[in-house]
Amino acid sequence: MTREDIRSTILEVIADIVPDEDLSALTGDVRIRDQIELDSMDFLDIIMELRKRYGVEVPEDDYMELATLDGSVNYLEPRMKEI
Amino acid sequence: MIYDAIIIGAGMSGLAAGIRLAYFDKKVCILEKHSRVGGLNSFYTFNGYKLDVGLHAVTNYVPKGIKSAPLPKLLRQLRLRIEDFDLYQQKMSAVRFPDKCLRFTNDFNFFVQEIAENFPSQTDNFQQLLKKIFAYDELSLTAKPVSARKVVSSYLSDPLLIEMIFCPLMYYGSARENDVEFAQFVIMFKSILCEGFARPQVGVRKIIEALVGKYRECGGELRINSGVKTIRIIDNKVKSVLLENGEELIGEKIISSAGYLETMQLLSGLDPSKVKTREGQLSFMEFILILDTEPTKKGYDTTITFYNNSNEFVYQKPVGLADISSGVICCPNNFLFDKPLPEGIIRITNMANFELWDGLDEEDYRIQKTECLEATLKEVAKIIPDFRSSIKAVDIFTPKTIHKYTGHLNGAPYGAPDKIKDGRTHLDNLFICGTDQGFLGIVGAMLSGISMANLHVLMG
Ligand SMILES: Cc1cc2nc3c(=O)[nH]c(=O)nc-3n(C[C@H](O)[C@H](O)[C@H](O)COP(=O)(O)OP(=O)(O)OC[C@H]3O[C@@H](n4cnc5c(N)ncnc54)[C@H](O)[C@@H]3O)c2cc1C
């Protein structure tokens, strides 16, 4: 996957978890949770969905890497490029 | 076949836990002893009438658009939409004591206004109490338990107002006699007074169908008529579960919604010193009246009435078979449905004593049910219009019925007075969800199943 693919994949996952949120204006370098209503259960689900759909494992110590959209893309790029 | 998780009980909590696990591709099997799912909140047919076992109202109702409340949270977790539950809001409910009546709707400001009108001297105190309630983290797993009566009476000085606030909250969710932990008080306060009541047009079966449908769609396995007889322990771990039909199933993790003590009693070679909980004592009986008329036609528009016929509210196991001095009267017709329900229905709940009911022989049991019915109908006729001449059929259940169908000790639907908030037991791979984990009611039970599945299987 390219960085663009990864970004839209993450957005797709978030859209499935919080279908009523408008994601079109999400800024890449600001904490996702500061821009849309996402509680800790929802955040955990982003990680769970990535594992379910793409087999990507994110260990608990790395959760913070996924706080922003840009951070997520950076973190996932090496882990998803073969997909 | 080794399951990732085996769930004991297909009530609200077991089904919700099952959906979470099946959705994330765990091999999961729910075992239900009964021929039907739903547990304390199931449904049945009586003389051709479709009835709900427990449902008065779904608490925690918030309109679409609010995201951070328990109901939308759990819907997101289950990948369901609010439409899947087909909820309609209540009209208006009331807490009725001899000298005062406090009404409430799903608009919290209405209730605040009622307090101001009925208890003008308490208006400021009530605002202070609200501040305390909204600032409190009721879901904390580490908070020290404090008495809600102590906290509330440090804010409110009119004992009648205190009793009137405790009455509905205790009835809809206290496993403890006369007092409740402040965290539980806050949960109930928000779920009933700040949020509110709703009901699916066809009753609880709508919710159960949504849950079972989702669970199956995710590939989960559900077995009814599959009571767990023994949980086999080897080296401080659950090795397998043995069903009543002799079959043995192996699971890495076991989540039980059968109740804490009830689950402990299933353990092979149980060491009684490991069991630290008191039994729940509070049970209820319920009278379901099928009427030949719509209750509104007789001028009754209230959704749920909590009544108490003195100024002091006593919430404890009655010394007699039942205590009709207080109770809950629910009218399922009085929600804002699109079309009327097929029947007029009134449901009356009173506190009842399990041991006394359990000790009656068959004939006395029948006679006493009828006598209690007459007594409660007479009492209730002082509070709402008299429906006695409109009754077509009556079904009655007692604490014995609750015990028989759900296995909860003493027929106590709210379980043991001390809750196990992290769901852990002394065994590494056995966890508790539902009633005895601490979240009660339909919404609470589902949240309990979800959080225990997340914490102990998906994350652990
Ligand atoms: C009369 C009444 C009215 C109520 N009204 C309302 C209401 O209006 N609104 C509301 O929100 N809440 C209401 N409640 C409360 C609500 O029903 C419960 O809090 C909730 O359903 C509890 O769900 P649970 O999954 O924790 O437990 P349960 O529903 O008890 O589920 C446990 C399941 O485990 C099964 N089981 C037990 N032992 C075994 C075994 N050994 N092997 C296999 N299976 C086993 C049982 O059969 C049961 O199905 C009411 C309860 C009662 C009794």
Image (spheres, rainbow, N blue to C red):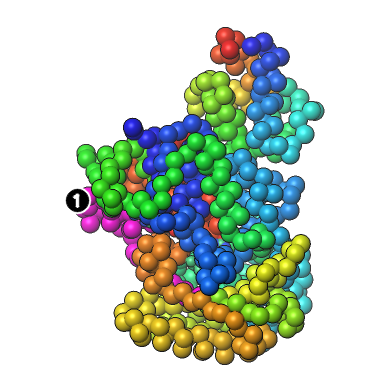
Q: Is residue B203 magenta?
A: no
* Extreme residue in the left direction: B269
Q: x, y percentage for residue B163? A: 58, 77
Q: State whether residue B55 is above or below residue B388.
A: above
Of B125 and B73, which appears nearest the observer?
B73
What's the magenta region? B257-286
Q: x, y percentage for residue B244? A: 28, 52
Rendered residue at 28%/50% (across/down): B245
Rendered residue at 63%/79% (across/down): B291
Of B199 and A39, which appears nearest the observer?
B199
Q: State whether residue A12 is above or below residue B277.
A: above
Residue type at numbered disc 1: Gly
Rendered residue at 77%/34% (across/down): A22
Of B77 and B48, which appears nearest the observer?
B48
Rendered residue at 34%/37% (across/down): B251
* Extreme residue in the right direction: A25
On the picture, is B407 further left or further right than B75?
A: left
Q: State whether residue B72 is above or below residue B176.
A: above
Residue occupied by mark 1: B269
Identify the image quadrant of residue B27.
top left
